[in-house]
Image (cartoon, rainbow, N blue to C red):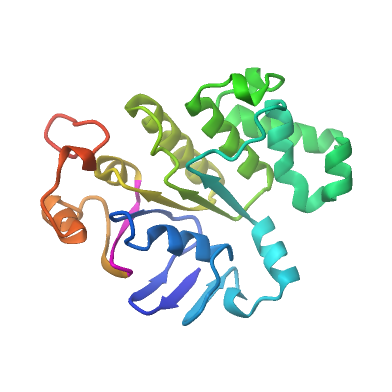
Amino acid sequence: MAIEFDGVSLTIPEGQFVVVVGLSGAGKSTLVRTINGLVPVTSGTLSVDGQDVGRASRRQLRALRGSIGMIFQSFNLVTRTSVMNNVLMGRLHQVGTFRSLLGWYTAAEKELAFDALERVGIVEKAWQRASALSGGQQQRVAIARALAQEPTIMLADEPVASLDPPTANAVMRDLQRINRELGITTVVNLHFLDLARRYGDRIIGMRAGQVVFDGTGEEADDAVFERIYGRSLTADDVIAKEPGGLA
């Protein structure tokens, strides 16, 4: 994946786990949503799996989105239906709207959905209504739905912002494990600096639409984060204080 915008020049190799950090309005959500075409490329270039996103036709964009799993802060589930149906919606780009509405899924597609739920540890919830789940469980369903797409890239836009510290860490561990086991390129937007340092192979710091840091978690010390945020760090910048600070 190669990105060339004003103030942003990035190449993300296949299989890397990248965490993008910055204050609200820094441009990190715009960056992630541009990758799958939710935000149009107005200048510069963006190439994903060899596809020039800025010049892609609607048909090409649909195909691109089919290969990119997207996880949102608000989960974006259909809460009135079952967990299994929500996960199977990840197959929509393959089965089409008609089969999806009628629930006509093959045994192989259902097996794929079960496997996705197993990877996030909630296969026993498959036939429960999504509305009956906790926030952390709903986010795991959203991850399983993205996995059911069989994506080459996974994007997560503030996936733990509404979760408590133990659940946030569990969700980040799920994403990290999936990245390592399946080799899916993963880009996660986070506000919490301790989570960024703990789980990111690579941290990209954004400020006012510019990349101001690009390095490893080990290189991202408190001084680096203060440069990214343009101010001293506060308790709100970490999800849970660990012994020794942000480690």
Residue 8 % position (x, y) = 36, 73
Residue 186 % position (x, y) = 48, 52
The residue lying toward the viewer, choosing from 8 and 16, is 8
In the displayed structure, 56 sits above or below 155; it is: below
What's the residue at 68%, 42% (across, down)? Answer: 148
**In screen coordinates, is 47 left or right of 243?**
right
Is 87 covered by the magenta stretch? no
From where the camera sits, is residue 104 visible?
no
> Magenta residues, as a range?
200-209
What's the residue at 54%, 45% (across, down)? Answer: 71
Q: Quadrant of residue 79?
A: top right
**In screen coordinates, is 129 left or right of 138?**
right
Q: Quadrant of residue 109?
A: top right
Quick one: quadrant of the C terminus?
top left
**In screen coordinates, is 5 left or right of 246?**
right
The residue lying toward the viewer, choosing from 110 and 16, is 110
Overall secondary structure of the magenta section:
strand
